[in-house]
Amino acid sequence: MRVTVISLLGWTVASRADGLTIDYETAQLAAQDVGDFSDIAPAATDNGTTAIGRQSGPACRAFPGSADWPLNADWKRLNASLGGALLKPLPQASVCYQGPAFDAAECTSVVNNQVLSTAIFENPLMYTSTWPTGATCPVATNPTGTCTQGGLPLYVVNATSVRQIQIAVNFARNRNLRLVVKNTGHDFVGRSTGAGALSIWTHHLKGFEVLPNFSMGDYSGAAAHVGSGLMGYEVHEAMIQHNIALVAPSFGTVGTYGGYMAGGGHSSLGSLYGLASDQALSLNVVTAGGEFTTASPTVNSDLFYALRGGGGSTYGIVTSAVVKTYPPVSIGGLDIAFSSLDVGMEVFWKAVSVFFSFGGVIVDAGGKEGNYMSPLGTGNATFFNFTSTLEFPGIGPQAVTDLLKPLELAFQAVGINITFGQPTITQWSGVNFGAGLALKDVMFASRLIPRDVWDDPAKFAPAIAAMRKIAEAGYQLHGSTVSPSLRVAGYPGSDSGVNPAWRKAVMHCVVYDFAPHGVGVPPGDNLAARARLSQYTDLLRNVTPGSGAYINEADILEPNWQQSFFGDNYAKLVSIKDKWDPWGLFWAPNTPGSERLAVRVADKLPTQNGKLCKPCVKQVKQKRFTTS
Ligand SMILES: Cc1cc2nc3c(=O)[nH]c(=O)nc-3n(C[C@H](O)[C@H](O)[C@H](O)COP(=O)(O)OP(=O)(O)OC[C@H]3O[C@@H](n4cnc5c(N)ncnc54)[C@H](O)[C@@H]3O)c2cc1C
């Protein structure tokens, strides 16, 4: 069922499907706000036939200097409609470069704060990964190069109301602008940035209300109404304040109800309660047509399906969510570490096999585990460290000890002299790290390892051999043992657009390449490093046929990304995208329907530093490397 729309002075406004709104959602666009400023009027029709997303539309989105770029007077008028919320920020490091913005004291502050994740989410133009912007204004005390806007947006709407979001969406659609949505800017591959774009910054959409008795479809129980700008640490603070538990990232500055939920969202509670996208019961959304509406299992259910795991910035802008809550959870935890320096290489790999073959036991107990297999030294590695942090929600110390006893004995049987310590107990609400932590560009690829690979000896041995080859080539492997199966996803989570590969997975395995690939690295070297990483990740892909990768933590150059990130859901997601966004207004790399447009870059790198146009450039064939 689609929400009823009522015609008002020639354009339409959505009637709300339910009464749940957060303060900033009560201010909605009305006919008198539009007046004769047709640029901010909602879509009159929903066929989108002349838009860029369609064959007959313009070749490119408007870009500074193009004939269809809005005049200064248009931007001024837009700003007035927004109540002054339109920003035209320069790159943060512009104060370090000679020119009108130069400010030595400010530059010192930027240099000192560049390592803080807090500086990233508080700034409309800062991103965790700088390479997707083209890194055209690097932070430096005495830079010798130039500072340009590069792949950063040109204008930003600092949104504090739904009305402002509707105005910005309408302006972007009516003026053929590139539109991006930034929450915290933590997306690893640049889905929240874009050259010449108008950005809607959702970071200030805060709110948290406990709903002790909430009913939606077949769900009846505890819930909370949350603002889409809440970050991980704010959700953990709310857990403490209200003595409840929610699914949220452990890393404090990740946006919980923006990209994290839109892509899936794994956490320490993943094997117990499923993904973040499984928690949603109802979502408030501004659509590409400028409507403010609700999506839930009973209203606009197709949109609800897509917004949960089908990719961020594709179907609409989520302004708030009603999500499941749980009684407070304590986590029994244990750290394990061993090194090939101590036990020798062959025992090390036997122990790794022992550990991973225990993965099914961990997730069957509702547990989650995060491990790192780190090469020591540079180049092709000859020694490795293995560390693991095991977490068992709702399980006490003695039960954790009993559960892990067979693992301890199995380690000893293969020659690791290890005795597990006393498990710790932590309140999930108090888990919160990373705010203020140094963040930097990293390059990585990933793969979801299905449970049958761990459980079937004929598949298990080749998988471990693949990991060994990858590690020996100098890459770090980071595994998250977690199983958000259909069973734990429950209702309504089990019917969503999230990658079906998650439902069979026992581990999300990331392959990190710490070789520099940002500022100063020649594009050819960068592309060669990316090709080598992908070639080694193929070893994992080959032993996990039919599986996929987690869109939020994956390679921007993931082969066959449609299948890999969305599996059999892809065609359905594209049809939902086309229904709700026939203009192709929302665009982010590797999201459903995004192959219809491409960023025209000068250097062949997969950045957002160029015009967004219909594709015309032939794909560059990557150089292949031998992995044996
Ligand atoms: C340090 C760090 C730790 C991480 N830890 C985890 C983890 O434990 N588990 C996990 O699953 N992932 C983790 N991630 C990955 C994380 O899920 C993604 O980076 C995610 O995209 C972040 O979402 P965001 O809204 O914070 O970021 P943004 O970059 O602001 O947004 C990401 C995407 O979502 C879109 N978007 C944002 N808000 C909205 C909205 N309101 N409506 C529609 N679209 C929106 C953006 O346009 C963009 O496409 C981590 C990332 C980092 C950098």
Image (cartoon, rainbow, N blue to C red):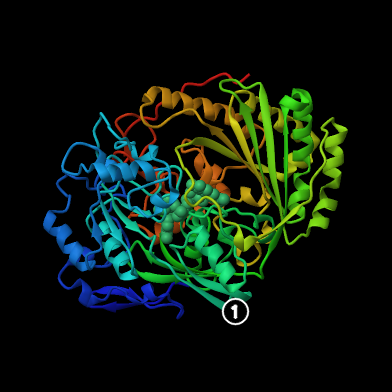
Q: Is residue 315 visible?
A: no
Residue at 40% over, 27% down: 620
Above or below 206: residue 340:
above
**Type of residue at label 1?**
Pro
Q: Is residue 200 visible?
A: yes
Residue 35 placement (x, y as % from top left) = 17, 73
Viewer-side residue, 613 vs 354: 354
Residue 256 placement (x, y as % from top left) = 50, 59
Question: Element type at marker 1?
Answer: strand
Q: Is mark 1 within 8 Å of ligand 1?
A: no
According to the picture, the residue beneath numbered tag 1 turns out to be 212
Residue at 68% over, 64% down: 329
Query: Could you classify mark 1 by the number of other residues whose Cα lies within 10 Å: few (under 14), some (14-19), or many (20 or more)?
Result: few
Left or right placement of residue 43 versus residue 355 in this view? left
Residue 299 placement (x, y as % from top left) = 49, 73
Q: Quadrant of residue 46?
A: bottom left
Residue at 45% over, 44% down: 590
Residue 369 placement (x, y as % from top left) = 69, 47
Residue at 42% over, 54% down: 184
Left or right placement of residue 355 versus residue 505 in this view? right
